[in-house]
Amino acid sequence: MAEPARAPAISLNGVTRAFGARPAIVGVRLVVERGEVVLLRGANGAGKSTLLRVVATALSPTYGGGAVLGFDLVEERDEIRRRTDLLTHRTRLYEQLTAAENLRFACALHGADPGAVPAALERVGLAAVADERVGGFSQGMRQRVAIARTMLRRAELLLLDEPYAGLDGHAREVVDQAVLSARDAGRTVVLATHERTREGLATRTVLLEAGRLRPHPVPPARSVVPR
Amino acid sequence: MSSLRLVAAVAAKDLRIELRGRHVAGVALPFAGTLLLSFGLALGPGRALLEAAAPGLLWLALLFASTILARQAYEAEAEDDALEGLVLAPVDKAAVFAGKATAMAVELLVLEASVLVMVAVLFGLPLGRGVAVLAAALALGTVGLAAVGSLFGLLAVVPRAREAALPLLVMPLVTPVLVAGVKATELAVAGRGGEAGSWLGLLVAFDLVFLAAGTLVFEHLIEE
C-alpha cells in the first residue's frame, strides 16, 4: 500500500456490500485521486449511498477491500474517520440543542476549534439563529448547519450524499459553495446526486447502475455552476 | 480530546437534551408514581403490609423508570441519524458509553429523590434510620442501572429490536440490583444497616461488571 500522504484519496478493490442476501454494490473498483471532485450518479437504489457509507466506514465491505487516504478500510477506520466527512440529507443534529450547541458538540467529537463556530454559522447565513434550537429549523436550515459542521472540520475527503434533497435555492448555493471551497483548497470531494446540472462542479463523473460502476462517463449536462 | 473531556461533553449534551425534553419529570416520574399508586391500591390499606412492601416497590419503580430513561437517552440519537455521527467520530467509544452512563446516573438520582419521597409518604418508609446504608444502596444501584441502561439502550434504536427487546433484556439482567437494593433498603430502614454489607458488596460487584462490560462491548454494539 502507498504511503498515506501519497496514496489516492480512494482506492477500492472489488468491494461488495450486501444487506442479507441482497447486494447493494457489487465488485466496485474505483480510484479517486487527491484533489478530484467526482460526481457519482445513478438511479434510486443504484447503491450510491451504500458506496459512500462504505468509504466513510459507516458500513464494512462484505467482500473486497481498499484504502481511503492510504488507510485500510477495515483495519484503520479511526484514521479514515479523522480525515473524512460524510454529509447526507439526514443532518445528524440534535433537535433539542441550538445550532451553536450542535456545532460545539461536533467540535468536541472531532477535535475542531469551537471558537470558529460563530464564523461558520455566519458563512452559512445562520448567525442570527445560532442560539435557537434546530428542532424549529426547516430542512434547508438544518442542512446549512450541517455544512457549517463540515467547514469546521475541514476534512481531507468530503463525501456528499444527495446534499440538495429538499433544499431551496439559497441552501443549494451554500452546498455548491462548500464544494467549490473544498475543491479550491485541494481537498477531495465525492458528490452523489441525481442532479446533472451539478456536473459543472466535478472534474469527472462516474455512474453506478444496479450496484456496479459503469466504465463510461455520462455525457455532461449544461452546467449552472461556475467552474 | 482527552477521554475525560469527551465523557463530560457527551454527558453535558445528554443532560442538556434531558433538561429541555423533561423526560424525567414528564414521563419517568409520572410512570413511577402511577406504578406506586397502583401497587398501593392493590395491597390495600394495611399499614404493616405497605411498610413491608415499600423497599421492594421503591426498587421496582426505579427499575421500570430506568428502562424508560434508557430508551429516551437513545431516542435523541435516532431522531436525525445523530447516532451515526457518534459512530463516525474518531473517538474512544468507551468514553461515549461513559458519558451516556454519567448523564443517565444524574437523571436517575433526580428520579430517586422524588420516588423516595413518594414511597415514604405513600407507604410509610422510615427514611430516618440507616441513612448511610440507604444512600449507599441507592448510589450503587444507580451506577448499575445507568451502566446497563446505557449499554442496552442502544437496542432501542436498532430497528429490529426496539421497544419490546429492551425491558425483556434488561429486567433479568438487573435482578441482582433489585434483590440487593431491596434487601439493603429493608435492613437500613429496620435499623440493621450493619448487616447490609454483603448486599452492598453485591451492588459493587454488579457495578464493576457492567461498567467494565459497557466499556469493552459498547464499540461493537454501536458499530453496524
Image (cartoon, coloured by chain):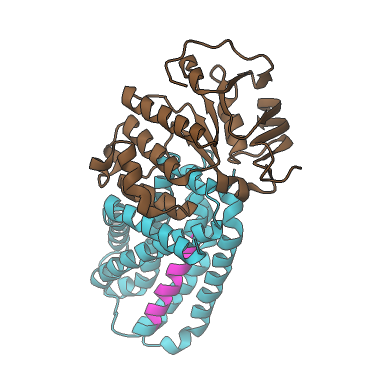
Tell which chain the image draws in cyan: B
Give the residue at the far right of this rendering: A1
Please state which of residues B96 and A179 is positioned toward the viewer in this rendering.
A179
Question: Left or right: B143 with respect to B110?
Answer: right
Q: Is residue A168 above or below residue B182?
A: above
- Toward which corner of the image does residue A29 lie, by quadrant? top right
Question: Left or right: B157 with respect to A142?
Answer: right
Q: Position of residue B175 (x, y in %)?
A: 51, 64
Please state which of residues A52 and B201 is positioned toward the viewer in this rendering.
A52
Please state, as top left, top right, bottom left or bottom right, where the N terminus of chain A lies in the image: top right
Which residue occupies 27% across, 66% down? B114
Tell which chain the image draws in brown: A
Q: Give the range drawn in magenta.
A: B133-148
**What is the chief secondary structure element of the magenta stretch?**
helix
Please tell me whether residue B134 belongs to the stretch shown in magenta: yes
Please tell me whether residue A212 belongs to the stretch shown in magenta: no
Q: Is residue B55 above or below residue B85?
A: below
Which residue occupies 61% across, 51% down? B220
Q: How many marks?
A: 0
Question: Left or right: B48 with respect to A78?
Answer: left
Please state which of residues B82 and B211 is positioned toward the viewer in this rendering.
B82
Give the residue at the far bottom of this rendering: B194
Q: Where is residue A39 in the image (x, y as percent from the top left)?
A: 55, 23
Q: Position of residue A162 (x, y in %)?
A: 47, 26
**Residue A53 visible from this viewpoint:** yes
